[in-house]
Every structure is written in structure tokens, then in C-alpha cells.
Amino acid sequence: MELTNIGVIKDLFERHGFSFSKSLGQNFLVNPSVCPKIAEFGGCKAGVCAVEIGTGVGVLTQELAKRCDRVTAIELDERLKPILNETLADFDNVEVIFADVMQANLEDIVRKFDGKETVVCANLPYYITSPVIMKILESRLPIKSLTVMVQREAGDRICASPGTRESGAVSYAVRYYSKPSLLFKVNRGSFMPSPNVDSEVIKLEITNEHQLPKNVEETLFKLIRSGFSQRRKQLVNPLSATLNISKSELSDLLSSLDIKPSARAEELTLENYIALAERLS
Ligand code: SAM
């Protein structure tokens, strides 16, 4: 079933009485070149299992299922159940779990793949892009990569190098766990209905380079969040309030770590934040 064909989608919706939910970020892909590219770049092939978040009518699910050994997809909208029963009927290697991805037990899902290489591929609902990405990264699932479609501005920020003006707290958090890269841009006309923004597909390759004790990790993310909450101010200002330490004490600490006491949040490298978190924990 050609799920990028608008006539086919409209027929499915009519027969099943389905209408789009804007609040669930339901912008479905209708550009036929995009899903095969997500699956290819995402490393989907024989011997690999995939987790998908947000199936819609199953357009990406089909591409993952064609290439991977097994696919487990999580979809919140139960109204899509009869549609997916029809569109995924030819695939016996797909399981759809109807749940909120933020509540789902992702460890359990990946465990059922019996140690096979696992990737996450998705056209994410944009209202929870960062929380979903951070949930997956923070839970340190044994996965190889995440290849996801996100709103263009969000993708640019996630992939921005720390130390650049485009970077934000999320750029640092993502780099702690992974190596991000921008794969390709997708314009708004590739979706039905068209959103008001353009999109892009990014890939986060899990590195496991940094493995700090839990309390140091917590301090690290607290420092990054606090710094970027007032990114135009010198870092000592938000940090002294968050940590309840005097500005002069904090300035001395920064100097001892070779960090300018006048630095703003975006002027620090991830390693600077890690060193600071280690010292403070
Ligand atoms: N993969 C399909 C495609 O590319 O056409 C659909 C992508 S659409 C942007 C996002 C999908 O995520 C929708 O089907 C929506 O119902 C689902 N969704 C929204 N919030 C969700 C949540 N919290 N947990 C799981 N799925 C969710």
C-alpha cells in the first residue's frame, strides 16, 4: 500500500473515520523519498532491530520493517489501531505498542530484541522532541543510534557545536551521550497537513564516551541548565544563585580550572562543565 499517496491516505481516513490531531503533532510524511532515506541512514538492515516513535499510518514503519529483523513502534493515538492493522498487515515482524513514549518502558522493549543491534528511527512529534531525545539518551539504552526528523531550528540547536552562538543547553546534553550530525533537510510541503515550519533529519550516534557517577551527572546538567537560563549574563551570576555559593568563591573556582570568571554559558566547552561538576560534587 503506497502510504505517501495522498489519495490512498484520504481513502484510509474516510473508511476509518480518522481526522488529524494537531495537539499530537500529526503531520504525516507524504514525500516518497524521505522514509527510505531515514531507514538507510538509520542503519536499518538485516540483523538489526528498530524502535520507532509515532507511527502515524505506518509510512516509516513499513520502510523499517522491510529492512530490519524486527520493529517495535510506540504510538499514542489508539484511533490509528484499525488503520495500522490494515497498513502493516503484510509484515509479521512489527509490533505496535499503544502508549505514551514518555511513560513507556524502553528498556523492556529493547531487551526483547535479545542483544541484536538496535537503532531508533522516528519522525518525532515536535511538541516533545527534546524530552523524547533526552529520555532515550539518559536511560542509556543499548542502542547504536537515533535517526530522527525534528523541526529545523531544534535540529540546528541539537547539532550545534558547544561554544557557538547557535548552541544551547540541549547541544551540550546531547554531546555528553552522543555524536550528533545533520543528515538532510525536509521542507514543510513533504507533510500532510503541512506544518508551519521546515524540518530536518538528524542522527545521534551513541558514544558512551562520558560515564560520570550519577551525582556528578546531576550536577553537570544542573550547571548547564542554570548557565543557559541566563545565557547573556556571566555564568557566575546564575550559578552562584543555583549553587548558593558566593560569586567570588565561584570566580576563584573557575580560574583554578582555567575558565575565565567573566565567561558566559556558551563560552565553556563540555569538558569545562564536566570539570566544574566534578569539583562541585
Ligand atoms: N511516522 C509518521 C509519519 O512520518 O508520517 C507519523 C509522524 S507524526 C509527526 C508523529 C506521530 O507521533 C503521530 O502519529 C502521533 O500520534 C504520535 N505521537 C504523538 N505524541 C506521542 C507520544 N507521546 N507517544 C507516542 N506517540 C506519539
Image: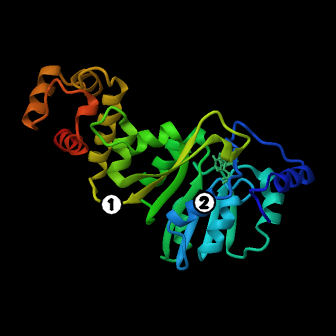
The answer, for residue 249, to whether it is visible in the render is yes
Q: Position of residue 48 (x, y in %)?
A: 52, 74
32 left or right, relative to 121: right
75 left or right, relative to 251: right
The amino acid type, in three-letter code, at marker 1 is Asn
Most foreground residue, 271 or 66: 66
Of all residues shown, which one is farthest toward the bottom? 47
Are the residues tagged 1 and 2 within 8 Å (C-beta)?
Answer: no
Q: Position of residue 13 (x, y in %)?
A: 86, 50
Location of residue 258 with respect to 113 vertically, above or below: above
**Which residue in the structure is indicated by mark 2?**
52
144 left or right, relative to 84: left
Residue at the spot x=63%, y=58% of the render?
A: 33
- Dot 2: few (<14), some (14–19), or many (≥20) neighbours within 10 Å? many
SS for dot 2? strand
Residue at the spot x=61%, y=63% of the render?
A: 36
Within 8 Å of ligand 1, the CB of disc 2?
yes
Q: Position of residue 165 (x, y in %)?
A: 33, 31
Location of residue 200 with respect to 145 vertically, above or below: above
Quadrant, the N terminus = bottom right
**Which residue in the structure is indicated by mark 1?**
208
The answer, for residue 105, to whether it is visible in the render is no
Quadrant, the C terminus = top left
Residue at the spot x=82%, y=58% of the render?
A: 83
SS for dot 1? loop
